[in-house]
Amino acid sequence: MSLTGDKKHRKSASGPSGGEECRENPEVSDAGASPPSSPERTSPPQLGPGQIKPKGYRFSTSQPPEIKLGLLMTKGQLEVEVVCARRIPSREAPPDTYVKCYLREQDRWLQKKKTRIAKHSYEPQFRQTLKYQACDILGRSLVVMLWERQGGFEHNQGLGGAEVALDALTLTHLTTGWYPLFPIQFLGSDSNDSP
């Protein structure tokens, strides 16, 4: 089963199609989904399936940006479906964003893959599948980072990232969930690389 190939299964497993997937909807249940937002919420965000909390990070009371991912091992490949993001902080204009993924083995960052740029949106829809060979993921984690593209000669800005322990998941079954994004500097040394 492919994440992109079996749309009928995906709709029934992930909720309604269209832009509603990224809206905060309490009726849609995802593994590790965060509860709907409310101004008085003070508890830390719930981690996504298999997500690793960065060392030294302390949760604040504000809700961080989140990214929705689907993970599945099929035909000898790990398929990482980057669905969408939400709760991107407001600025003057909606940002142009993209997602970068790496496989991480201790301090080594391997096999960078990127999505296309989603233009002018605080809730970007990526709907793109990135693939890694099954033999390359053993003993490694997946690092997913959301970046804002800057104009001109400015460096792109990291909006946040999440690290997923792949060994903690049953990858033969589709795992979907919302992953809160931690500040880029808590992910390690290579996380400041913007291209």
Image: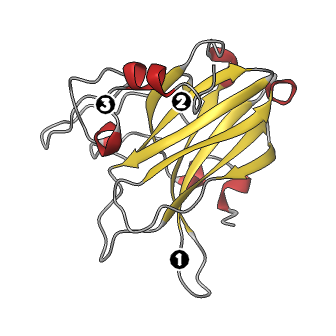
- Name the quadrant containing residue 88: bottom left
Q: Residue at x 61, y 53 (%)?
A: 115
- Give the Cα distance between marks 3 and 2: 15 Å
Residue 127 image point, x, y percent:
51, 44
Seen from the viewer's position, the closer of residues 43 and 101 is 101
Checking the image for residue 70, the label placed there is: 2
Q: Which mark is residue 150?
A: 1
Could you tell me which secondary element the residue under label 2 belongs to?
Answer: strand
Residue at which label 3 appears: 16
Residue in view at x 54 percent, y 24 percent: 6
Tag 2 or tag 1, which sits nearer the N-term?
Answer: 2
Quarter of the figure with residue 59: top left
Where 160 sits versus 120, above or below? above
Q: Which image quarter holds the N terminus?
A: top right
Question: How many marks overall?
Answer: 3
Q: Secondary structure at mark 1?
A: loop
Q: Is residue 103 left or right of residue 163?
A: right
Estimate the spatial distance between the alpha carbons at disc 1 and disc 2, rounded to whole Å: 27 Å
Q: Residue at x 12, y 39 (%)?
A: 40
Q: How many other residues sit within 10 Å of disc 2, few (<14), some (14-19) or many (≥20)? A: some
